Image (cartoon, rainbow, N blue to C red):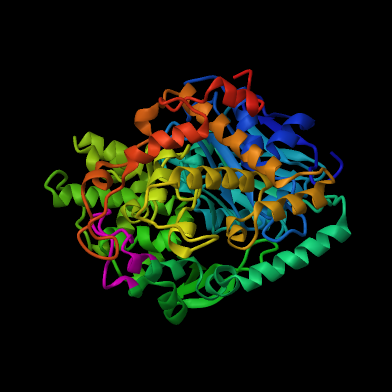
Amino acid sequence: MQFGWQNKILSVNLDNQKDKISEIDEEIALNYLGGRGLAVKLYFDAIPPKIDPLSSKNQIIFATGPITATPVYTSGRFSALSKSPLTGTICDANSGGIWGATFKKCGYDSLILAGAAKSPIYLYIDENEVKIEDAQKIWGLNTHETTNNLQEIHGKNSKILCIGPAGENLVKFASIMNDKNRALGRGGLGAVMGSKKIKAIVVNGNKEVKIADKKKLDFYLDETKKWLDAITITGRSLPMFGTAVLVNIINEFGLFPIRNFQEGYSDLADKVSGESIKENILVRKSGCYKCPIACGRLTEVNGKTGKGPEYETVWALGPELGIFDLKKITEANYRCNELGIDTISTGVTIGCAMELKEKGYYNEAPSFGEVDKLGSLIEDITYRKGIGNELAEGSKFLAESKNHPEFAMQVKGLELPAYDPRGAQGQGLAYATSNRGGCHLRAYIIGPELLGVPTLFDRFQSYNKPDLVIRTQNINAMLDSIIICKFTAFAISEDFYSRLLTAVTGIKYSSEDLMTIGERIWNLERLFNIREGFTKKDDTLPKRFLTEPLKKGGSKGKIVKLDEMLSEYYIARGWDQNGVPLKSTLEKLGLKEL
């Protein structure tokens, strides 16, 4: 593997503060690529069953892909993977920005962190050395303060990944932040870092990533740029309005969740839309490494500047809570980034608490629409003060502790994002079968069901949705392993990804090869969850979506017809009716030994 991969894995044992470097097994690289795929393979093979995610026996793995840090558009992304303290599932998150590309330019494809330090530390990594430094003076600082402090020590060219106070306090949905405002957001991986007493990872590298066929790659990149510019979503909508361009669209379809998913439409939605962000608080747009789309927003509110809010955040800290004050939402977003806490799980967990209060089961919680309590409640969750200590465990724990699990809008313990599945049958199936729990990024069926990309499907029809969901899940597993931004999939196909990967690595990959890799990764993740005790009963949705039709809006009268899709999904996956992969399926995917 002379091209694409750096062919090195850095492992750091925090128990004895020793590090070692090993080569990537060539067969693993070819069959799992990098990013999410490489990480799940390394993790599955290394971790015994049933470990506590916050114990020193757990590991967290950071991984780049063969395309990372190359001229390929949006190639700055990287993954982190571990067992989630929030859900108990396999959990990877990926992030953009600059950190991932800089880490790979240090000469490594992956970083494995095992054990736990006795006192706070941070890592410094460059092309020549790996150092473990004392972090006691920066323990307790927020993510922005930590970044500024470490760049003063190591220089502005150093890129910083770190946790904030939420990770230090083991909030179950603490995020890991990089480049100040980019997040490995979901599943509580920040708490895993906090349990290991790792405050930050500083990287500073300029080592070249070798390309097999630069001339061919340049041609494919020219074609990629043409497609990205030609498609409305990537060429105009996202660059102009950011991800919050979806607010008005999803609201008009009637699946924009309001007040903890009790409603799917609001006349007030435009107050927090991408159009309103552009008109009222936008400073300029911004992009990640090698990104021509630039969907990020640099904003300013009351004299303070920051990034976002993105679509999911503007919803989770706003309409989900009955709040439509854009400036207050933006300030809350800034604070979540500084404290290192996932905005989706934060908002949905607060929404759960608000509905519990509304129904008379949790008098201590705030009420829907109480915007002035939002900021202080985020602080209380971060520092586990008052009711914040209960909310820091997530919505599933909270609702079950009040004997009303039906008010937790989650799948497998992970809070759901900003698409009510009653308005999109395929997205409901995708939530229910997601390996990391309630997530739109495992399979973004909103594309074909609402946006017509690549083809428009009837969103209320359940027929043939299992095949669509499986295909999209496999594609996304592959994209997370190459690793590249999913927004590019609005414009280019897996056939084009295979050409890009072949030009970079010099290894002939077909589109069928990439789809098989995605399927292999998905099945290995499924096997991990089965090993941890997850069964068919966990492939479900909150009762609300299955039995309570929406009362107004473009999805009025709809529920999710999950049962009639799930059985067909298992058959199409090559699993038995308990959701366990068949022997023949595992043999086909090269997983026979499992």
Q: What residue appears at the point 29 percent right and 51 percent down from the top-left corner?
A: 350
Kindly tell me whether residue 9 is visible in this rendering: yes
Q: Residue furthest bottom?
A: 279
Point out residue 398 in the picture as x, y percentages from the top left corner. 27, 39
Stretch in magenta: 250-269
Q: Residue at left 57%, top 48%?
A: 94
Q: Nearer the viewer, residue 557 or 165?
A: 557
Q: Quadrant of residue 279?
A: bottom left
Q: Is residue 251 magenta?
A: yes
Q: Is residue 535 left or right of residue 422?
A: right
- Horizontal placement of 479 versus 260: left or right? right
Q: What secondary structure prevails in the magenta region?
A: loop
* 567 and 549: which is toward the camera: 567
Residue 393 in the image, given as x and y percentages of width and height: 34, 39
Which residue ends up furthest to the front in the rendered image?
463
Q: How far from the left and from the top, in percent, is residue 521?
A: 60, 35
- Left of 469 or right of it: where is 159? right
Q: Is residue 22 visible?
A: no
**Residue drawn at the location 59% of the way across and 47% of the way down:** 475
Q: Is residue 167 above or below residue 22?
A: below
Residue 154 rendering spot, x and y as whole percentages: 71, 53
Total numbered labels: 0
